[in-house]
Image: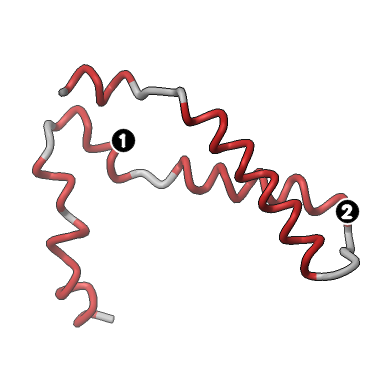
Amino acid sequence: MVRRLERDLPELLSFFAFPRHLWRKLRTTNVIERCFVEVRRRTRPMVCFVNVESVDRIIYSIFQRFNLEWKTRTLSVFTQAA
């Protein structure tokens, strides 16, 4: 584990190359975590699925909706820094 951390350390700390006010936005995984919370929220009430394809369809639909919502959304923090 230590070898892997040492190997990947430059990439893990690359957010330091950006202005300080962007650090939190760049290093957080809240957006990713929120996506998976939404997947769990939508799939748990269904309890069981008929087959793998049915699970794939619901997960695809959830992420397709995210893509449509985010397509036109700009992050003001990043546009101000540019």
Crowd around label 1: few <14 · some 14–19 · many ≥20 (10 Å): some
Query: Picture coordinates of residue 18 (x, y %)?
Result: 12, 37
Display coloring: secondary structure
Query: Picture coordinates of residue 25 (x, y %)?
Result: 31, 35
Image quadrant in which the C terminus is located: top left
Query: Picture coordinates of residue 57 (x, y %)?
Result: 75, 55
Q: Amino acid at mark 1?
A: Lys
Establish if 77 lies above or below 67: above
Residue 28 falls left or right of residue 34: left
Establish if 2 lies above or below 76: below
Please give the name of the residue rendered at 60% of the width and 50% of the height, measured from the top-left corner: 36
Q: Which residue is mark 2?
A: 46
Which circle's residue, 2 or 1, is located before the other in the chain?
Answer: 1
The quadrant where residue 64 appears:
top right
Image quadrant in which the N terminus is located: bottom left
Q: Which mark is residue 12?
A: none
Question: Contact, CB < 8 Å: mark 2 with mark 1?
Answer: no
Crowd around label 2: few <14 · some 14–19 · many ≥20 (10 Å): few
Measure the C-alpha gap from mark 2 to mark 1. 34 Å
Residue 67 falls left or right of residue 20: right
Establish if 23 lies above or below 45: above
| Disc 2 secondary structure class | helix
Q: Which residue is mark 1?
A: 25
Please give the name of the residue rendered at 78% of the width and 65% of the height, measured from the top-left corner: 53
| Disc 1 secondary structure class | helix
* Of residues 62 and 3, the one drawn nearer to the viewer in this rendering: 62
Front disc: 2 or 1:
2
Please give the name of the residue rendered at 76% of the width and 46% of the height, measured from the top-left corner: 42
> Residue lying furthest left in this view?
17
* Of residues 2 and 10, the one drawn nearer to the viewer in this rendering: 10
Q: Amino acid at mark 2?
A: Met
Q: State how many labels appear.
A: 2
